[in-house]
Image (spheres, grey):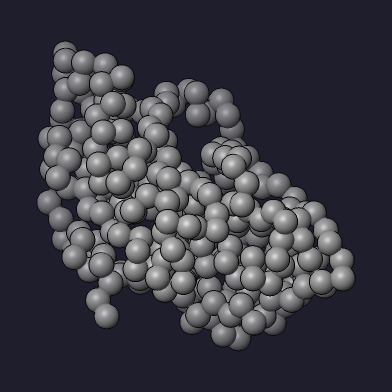
Amino acid sequence: MQHPAEHSPLGKSSQYIAEYSPELLFPISRTTKWAELSLDGANLPYRGVDYWNCYELSWLLPSGKPVVAIGEFAIPADSPNIIESKSFKLYLNSLNQTAFASWDEVQATLARDLSAVAGKPVAVRLRALAEVAAEGVATLPGQCIDELDVSVSQYAHPQPELLRCDASRVVEESLHSHLLKSNCPVTGQPDWGSLVVEYRGAALDHASLLAYLVSFRQHADFHEQCVERIFLDLQRLLQPQTLTVYARYVRRGGLDINPYRSTEATTADNTRLARQ
């Protein structure tokens, strides 16, 4: 079955348009993957957001002088569509030779266009480089499990059967790993990420979690669906009181994508990591 992204600009030669062109944005329905994961879009078992950060954002002042900024976009996890990443980049580049009267006008334009394609309101924040630089680089919460000794031989598909827990013990903990890798389902390019798991529930075997995450290494799927799959597999195993799964992916084409899925209403810290 052809992936919906096959109809997008992804993996194809593209002409870069340097003047404002919102029609470049390409939506991909979440419905197909929700159905694959047995999810009902009207009754999702999580709340969340996809944070996109853009490091290649520029436009012109009315005088013709260029401005550069960093853009932060928060797309609701229950929006009908994700925005295909190459079309997102092409759209952002279409601002390069377009004059705007103010930062507020740029921000309002981005919010309007992205919300129309996602199908739900997208929050947009434009940030000065000095502001982002002052924040520095973040570290992930909790215990890093990357030094645990595990044996893995299968990488083509996620293997939830590797996950183990001790149902006799209930714990509350934060774990993270930098060894998450998957592949773009259309181009086959690698997607590198770091992952946080925070939960209260049956005690998860840390080594089994690491082996499970490594089994994604050759799996072909978008960032958002990888995180949702991990969330669902952990939820089935742990039957947790609370669960959060949050991935920080390395940027490509000036964009990084950071899906956050949680049983809680809180939002994530969007400060970048060392690889971002």
Query: Could you tell me if residue 181 is visible in this image?
Result: no
- Residue 5 image offset from top left, x and y in percent: 26, 65
The residue drawn where x is 64% and y is 65% is 235
Question: Left or right: where does residue 177 sit relative to residue 87?
Answer: right
Query: Could you tell me if residue 96 is visible in this image?
Result: yes
The quarter of the displayed image where residue 145 is located: bottom right
Residue farthest bottom in this picture? 153
Residue farthest front in this picture? 42
Quarter of the N terminus within the rendering: bottom left
- Residue 10 image offset from top left, x and y in percent: 24, 61
The residue drawn where x is 52% and y is 28% is 133
The residue drawn where x is 20% and y is 33% is 96
| Camera-nearest residue between 80 and 1 | 80
Question: Considering only vertical position in the picture, is 183 above or below 94?
Answer: below
Question: Considering only vertical position in the picture, is 274 above or below 11?
Answer: above
Residue farthest top in this picture? 63
